[in-house]
Image: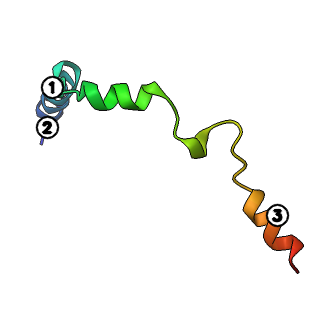
Amino acid sequence: MGRGRQKAKHTKVARELKYFSPDTDLSQLQKELAGAPEHESPDYDKWADLDEKSDDK
């Protein structure tokens, strides 16, 4: 494939990516932005259970 064809193909793909807008599930987006689940809250210590296991030895 020559450079002209290759460039035209890349231009076509770039144009499709630029102007393509997929359908957005706004209700799912709202759920995600509403708040973090309990395990992601700042008070949650994900290493606490590992500390307890090391104390049992």
Q: x and y percent of residue 37 in the render?
A: 52, 40
Comparing marks 2 and 1, which lies closer to the viewer?
1
Residue 25 placement, left or right of 16:
right
**Residue that carries the numbered disc 2 in the rendered image:** 2
Locate residue 15, reporting x and y percent. Answer: 17, 21
Q: Amino acid at mark 2?
A: Gly
In space, the residues marked 3 and 2 are separated at their CA atoms by 62 Å
Instruction: Give the number of the mark in front: 3 or 2.
Output: 3
Q: Earlier in the sequence, mark 3 or mark 2?
A: 2
Q: Which residue is mark 1?
A: 16
Q: Is residue 48 above or below residue 7?
A: below
Mark 1 or 3, nearer chain start: 1
Q: Amino acid at mark 1?
A: Glu
Residue at (26%, 24%) from the top-left corner? Answer: 26
Query: Are discs 1 and 3 less than 8 Å apart at CB?
Result: no
Apparent side of residue 22 relative to residue 51 in the rendered image (left or right): left
Counting residues from the start of the chain, the first of labels 2 and 1 encountered is 2
